[in-house]
Image (cartoon, grey):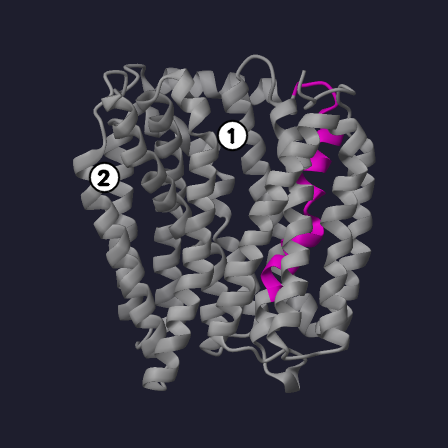
């Protein structure tokens, strides 16, 4: 019973610490740069580049196994993340704040990706198989709570500071200072509470052998049956989402004269960062239940519709703009609910395609390709939006949903895969 209490003491906080820096780097940074006067083209381009550490994560992970322990890595990266987030507060008042902020964001992104590797490895070493299964839902929930804290709580807090001080730069500086302080507290807590698993040690294998093994694993991935349809699916299933995910928060916050909705930071934190994430969480739960009951084959087109059709809410909001917060919140909730529901089919296919020898490594390679599929379309989304305007950009997104349909029709899988036996 003591071991179980110890696991409860560190698993939720560890995955909260994993989710918070990710959402700050990938999502919240875009809102901050937009409010500080950076163009949509530059915001989308440079914040999309921040996906790169997650793209190359499979190539970096062998070195985490080779050097030091998982516990050492996750504590080191938590300390760097805390210091980096607090350091953001010092860059925003500088003349070249955009350049310095991006440099720190790159440090945060690489540290966060390494943090992910070490946490997932430590999870498997620190828990037995039964506990690993039991805590899957707990760790996912803790990760989503971190998303709410970052996209919702922090934005609401920054909005409050804006009203209190009348200074956007100061408000964001204080927000990142608080986020950095929270990560430092989590580092201190985990330094004390985390166990020291006997199995958490370096592999003892030379770097040359590790790279040779990884090379063989990498080659075997691309020798899997139906690799081309699978790659197209992994890269392009979220082609519309990769673009809309970058532009939607910019649309919500942009001035009405520019075609945006002109919402405040607090309103975005509530509508997208809180209700939206709750919708995402509920959609994922419903998607998991549905897939376990009927299997992937019977559900795939419902999932495709769920992840595509709700994007129409942004067409509606751009052509019939409103600052009615309840209505905007409902639209975002519906879109995120559908996305969460449809995304479960995507993650289930990643698990299916990784089956067999080297399953863990093959799944990691798939997640790297997935990150690439988010990075590349996101990089050009800001330029496309500024050329088209918000109204026609969101219509373009609906047209891009045909790509999701095409790649979903190409993939091969067993009829009953995912169905609970």
Are there few (<14), some (14-19), or many (20+) residues within 10 Å of tag 2?
many
Q: Which residues are magenta?
A: 223-248
Give the image location of residue 127, x and y in percent. 34, 22
- Residue for badge 1: 364
Q: Report the predominant secondary structure element of the magenta stretch.
A: helix
Q: Secondary structure at mark 2?
A: helix
In primary-sequence order, the first of circles 1 and 2 is 2
Pick the residue in front: 247 or 341.
341
| Residue 228 is a magenta residue | yes
Instruction: Look at the picture and state if 163 lies above or below 293.
Output: below
Q: Quadrant of the C terminus?
A: top right
Are there few (<14), some (14-19), or many (20+) residues within 10 Å of tag 1?
many
Q: Is residue 22 left or right of residue 417?
A: left
| Residue 338 is a magenta residue | no
Give the image location of residue 331, x and y in percent. 68, 64
Instruction: Look at the picture and state if 381 lies above or below 145.
Output: below
Q: Which residue, as the protein is rendered here, is positioned at the far top?
A: 357
Pick the residue in front: 89 or 4.
4
Residue drawn at the location 24% of the way across and 55% of the way down: 83
- Residue for badge 2: 190
Q: Secondary structure at mark 1?
A: helix
Q: Which residue, as the protein is rendered here, is positioned at the far front?
A: 1
Residue drawn at the location 23% of the way across and 16% of the way down: 198
Instruction: Look at the picture and state if 327 lies above or below 134.
Output: below
Locate residue 357: give its quadrant: top right
Q: Quadrant of the N terminus?
A: top left
| Image label count | 2
Residue drawn at the location 71% of the way across and 66% of the way down: 314
User: Could you say which disc has been placed on residue 217 in the image?
Assistant: none
Pick the residue in front: 278 or 383.
278
Locate residue 53: give its quadrant: top left
């Amino acid at each position: 019973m003591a071991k179980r209490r110890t696991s409860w003491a560190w698993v939720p906080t560890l995955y909260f610490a994993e989710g918070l820096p990710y959402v700050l780097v990938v999502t919240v940074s875009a809102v901050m740069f937009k409010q500080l006067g950076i163009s949509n083209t530059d915001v989308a381009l440079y914040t999309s580049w921040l996906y790169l550490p997650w793209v190359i994560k499979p190539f970096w992970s062998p070195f985490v196994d080779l050097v030091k322990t998982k516990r050492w890595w996750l504590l080191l990266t938590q300390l760097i993340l805390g210091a980096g987030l607090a350091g953001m507060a010092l860059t925003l008042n500088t003349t070249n704040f955009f350049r310095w902020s991006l440099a720190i964001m790159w440090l945060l992104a690489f540290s966060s990706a390494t943090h992910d590797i070490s946490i997932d490895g430590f999870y498997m070493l620190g828990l037995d198989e039964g506990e690993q299964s039991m805590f899957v839902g707990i760790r996912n929930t803790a990760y989503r709570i971190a998303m709410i804290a970052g996209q919702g709580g922090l934005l609401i807090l920054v909005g409050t500071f804006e009203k209190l001080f009348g200074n956007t730069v100061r408000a964001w500086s204080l927000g990142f200072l608080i986020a950095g302080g929270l990560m430092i507290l989590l580092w201190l807590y985990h330094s004390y509470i985390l166990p020291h698993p006997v199995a958490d040690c370096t592999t003892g294998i030379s770097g040359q052998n590790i790279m040779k093994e990884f090379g063989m694993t990498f080659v075997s991935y691309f020798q899997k049956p139906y690799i081309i349809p699978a790659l197209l699916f992994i890269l392009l299933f979220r082609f519309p989402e990769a673009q809309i995910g970058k532009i939607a928060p910019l649309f919500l916050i942009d001035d009405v004269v520019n075609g945006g909705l002109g919402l405040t930071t607090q309103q975005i934190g509530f509508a997208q960062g809180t209700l939206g994430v709750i919708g995402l969480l509920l959609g994922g739960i419903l998607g998991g239940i549905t897939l376990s009951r009927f299997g992937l084959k019977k559900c795939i087109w419902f999932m495709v519709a769920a992840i595509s059709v709700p994007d129409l809410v942004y067409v509606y909001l751009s052509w019939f703009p409103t600052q009615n917060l309840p209505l905007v919140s409902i639209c975002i909730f519906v879109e995120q609910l559908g996305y969460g529901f449809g995304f479960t089919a995507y993650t289930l296919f990643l698990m299916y395609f990784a089956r067999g020898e080297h399953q863990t490594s093959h799944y990691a390679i798939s997640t790297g390709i997935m990150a690439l599929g988010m990075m590349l379309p996101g990089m050009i989304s800001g330029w496309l939006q500024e050329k088209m305007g918000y109204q026609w950009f969101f219509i373009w997104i609906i047209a891009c949903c045909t790509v999701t349909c095409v790649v979903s029709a190409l993939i091969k899988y067993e009829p009953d895969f995912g169905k609970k036996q």
